[in-house]
């Protein structure tokens, strides 16, 4: 068995010490560390944090030769076990890598555990040592003794993150399956019981969605949440997920109702749990198997991330955690986010999926003008497909297609052809062709008629002043008004405003919030914008159109005005 002993070498210096033991090594044993972690599509070069590598067979020191940025070779003699020791610097608090300080530890094995090339199929084990007093451990990996866990192979090993420290811990059962939830960093007054109850509803609803009354493809599941001052994100695994959220978004014992921050957290929980099926098991054919030494390209992230993004909030509605009006408000936010991204006319969601490695995770000031998110536009593709399927009389709509794909692909490799074939099978080749055009095209999706056909009223609301100019800003009393991005084709772009500018005044009046200027400007009135660029003052003339910039709003159509067929369609979709 390939064995790893992971020690807390120095919590204050953020260093793990790892001892890798390889029984019966080959004459030339090659070791490598992944350069990326499945679910996060960016080459992150985990090997840059390794240091002090040594190798021995018994008492005999061996030479480690580095072959490339992430691969080492050891020349061994005989069958004596090879022991490799090294340290890993761990000070990245994200869900993707490893972190260690005097209060908390966390790691994904992709950051700590070198693979033994050619022996990835063998059983692997992890043993933890020198944990600070009072620290507990949470992981979904199979236990095999005190502070020891075991996996069937390396692929399973790297799919189980570990949370270490003095954290809050709770449990619940969903559809007969044990679930554990651990939270590190929560404020006093955190309502763990409410978090458990609400998460249980989400999990039970999703298990039933995929399997009815049957058991899911895991016997135990673990949520690991790190509550921090400012953070948001998650990373899915086969039987667990690592999450980061703002402390203020956790439920409090005195809290009544669901504020927007807690709804956002529940949506994240729902999103990552849905990935247990949609990307961890049902996955792009290009990912079978994963190639961890380089990028793995696919055009299907619009399906695996976008469709998951559609279902995450929908399951909050189905679980009874939010009502239909609130769900439509969340949908409108997604739709407006896409509509306010000029890059939707530059990049298709299939192209966005393929380019994730160099664009999505490397957002800059021009990203809104050149790219589109496969999360948000992918979610709108799923919404449109769901509505069109239901309008065509397909009972269950997109739900039916998702479950049919699970059966067709046996919970494994999936291609775009599989998706199109299932849509064609239930609704005809015409809709499958339309789906392909939505995915590979760069035009706006025909959402408005589809929503109106489901008795959802599409309204228009005036955007804020800065949004109407095409500006994305950061604003505070201390730093002033800073331009993050200027949208292509906007009034601000025409005037020559650039990312990095500091906006000082409008028509000679100092502003610390740009929207303040709307109080003294007339609709459509041009104005002088004073700004600071590279320490030099400049004044630009901004001309605005007569028509105000608008955002979309979605509300339930009035019952008296909605046709019976439209109301039936809406009822089948959101039970309202």
Image (cartoon, helix red, strand yellow):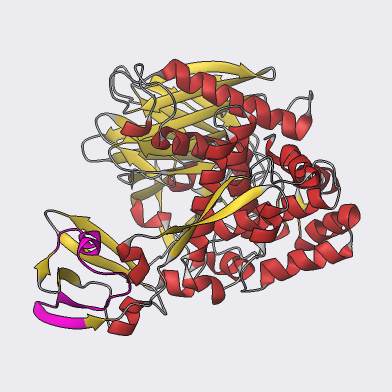
Most foreground residue, 220 or 225: 225
Q: Which residues are magenta?
A: 511-540
Residue found 51% across the figure and 65% down from its top: 339
Q: Is residue 436 left or right of residue 292?
A: right
Residue 385 vertical placement versus 22 (above, below):
below
Asked if residue 102 can be seen in this view, the reply is yes
Asked if residue 161 can be seen in this view, the reply is no
Residue 256 vertical placement versus 498 (above, below):
above
Check residue 524 for magenta coloring: yes
Residue found 38% across the figure and 19% down from its top: 168
Q: Give how far across and how far down residue 451 sits, in percent.
A: 67, 53
Q: Is residue 8 left or right of residue 439?
A: left
Check residue 153 for magenta coloring: no
Residue 286 vertical placement versus 179 (above, below):
below
Q: Give how far across and how far down residue 431 sits, in percent.
A: 82, 62
Which quadrant would residue 271 be assigned to in this image? top right
The tally of labels here is 0
Residue 91 vertical placement versus 385 (above, below):
above
Most foreground residue, 560 or 553: 560
Give the quadrant of the C terminus. top right
Give the quadrant of the N terminus. top right
Q: Give how far across and how far down residue 311 sits, in percent.
A: 63, 43
Most foreground residue, 574 or 473: 574
Farthest front residue in view: 560
Q: Is residue 500 left or right of residue 138?
A: left
Q: Give how far across and how far down residue 572 sits, in percent.
A: 76, 38
Residue found 56% across the figure and 16% down from its top: 172
Residue found 72% across the figure and 47% down from its top: 282
């Amino acid at each position: 068995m390939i064995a790893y002993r992971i020690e807390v070498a120095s919590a204050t210096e953020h260093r793990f010490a790892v001892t890798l033991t390889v029984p019966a090594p080959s004459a030339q044993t090659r070791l490598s560390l992944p350069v990326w972690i499945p679910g996060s599509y960016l080459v992150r070069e985990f090997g840059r944090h390794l240091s002090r590598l040594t190798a021995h067979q018994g008492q005999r020191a061996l030479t480690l030769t580095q072959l490339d940025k992430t691969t080492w070779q050891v020349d061994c003699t005989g069958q004596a076990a090879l022991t490799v020791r090294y340290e890993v610097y761990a000070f990245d608090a994200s869900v993707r890598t490893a972190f260690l300080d005097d209060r908390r530890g966390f790691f994904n094995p992709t950051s700590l555990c070198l693979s033994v090339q050619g022996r990835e199929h063998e059983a692997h084990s992890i043993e933890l040592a020198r944990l600070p007093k009072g620290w507990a451990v949470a992981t979904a990996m199979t236990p095999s003794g005190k502070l020891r866990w075991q996996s069937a192979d390396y692929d399973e090993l790297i799919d189980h993150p570990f949370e270490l420290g003095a954290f809050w811990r709770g449990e619940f059962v969903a559809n007969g399956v044990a679930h554990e939830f651990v939270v590190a960093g929560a404020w006093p007054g955190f309502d763990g019981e409410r978090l458990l109850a609400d998460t249980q509803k989400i999990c039970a609803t999703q298990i039933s969605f995929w399997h009815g009354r049957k058991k899911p493809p895991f016997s135990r599941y673990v949520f690991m949440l790190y509550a921090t001052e400012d953070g948001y994100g998650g990373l899915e695994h086969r039987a667990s997920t690592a999450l980061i959220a703002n402390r203020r978004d956790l439920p409090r014992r005195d809290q009544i109702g669901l504020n927007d921050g807690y709804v956002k957290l529940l949506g994240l929980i729902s999103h990552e749990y849905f990935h247990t099926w949609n990307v961890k098991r049902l996955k792009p054919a290009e990912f079978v198997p994963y190639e961890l030494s380089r990028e793995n390209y696919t055009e299907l992230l619009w399906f695996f991330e976008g469709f998951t993004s559609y279902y995450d909030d929908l399951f909050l509605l189905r679980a009874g955690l939010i009502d239909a009006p609130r769900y439509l408000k969340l949908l409108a936010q997604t739709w407006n986010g896409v509509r306010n991204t000029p890059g939707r006319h530059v990049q298709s969601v299939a192209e966005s999926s393929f380019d994730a490695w160099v664009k999505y995770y490397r957002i800059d000031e021009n990203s809104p003008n050149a790219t589109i998110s496969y999360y948000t536009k992918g979610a709108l593709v799923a919404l449109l497909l769901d509505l069109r399927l239901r309008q065509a009389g397909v009972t269950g709509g997109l739900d039916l297609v998702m479950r049919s794909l699970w059966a067709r692909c046996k919970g494994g490799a999936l291609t775009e052809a599989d998706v199109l074939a299932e849509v064609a099978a239930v609704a005809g080749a015409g809709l499958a062709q339309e789906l392909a055009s939505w995915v590979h095209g760069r035009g706006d999706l025909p959402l408005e008629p589809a929503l109106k056909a489901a008795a959802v009223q599409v309204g228009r609301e005036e955007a804020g002043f800065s949004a109407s100019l095409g500006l994305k800003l950061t604003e505070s009393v201390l730093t002033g008004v800073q331009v993050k991005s200027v949208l292509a084709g906007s009034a601000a772009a025409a005037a020559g405003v650039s990312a990095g500018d500091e906006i000082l005044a409008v028509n000679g009046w100092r502003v610390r919030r740009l929207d303040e200027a709307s109080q003294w400007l007339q609709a459509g009135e041009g104005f002088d914008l004073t700004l600071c660029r590279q320490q030099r003052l400049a004044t630009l003339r901004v001309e605005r159109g007569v028509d105000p910039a608008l955002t979309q709003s979605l509300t339930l159509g009035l019952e008296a005005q909605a046709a019976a067929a439209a109301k039936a369609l809406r009822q089948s979709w959101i039970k309202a």
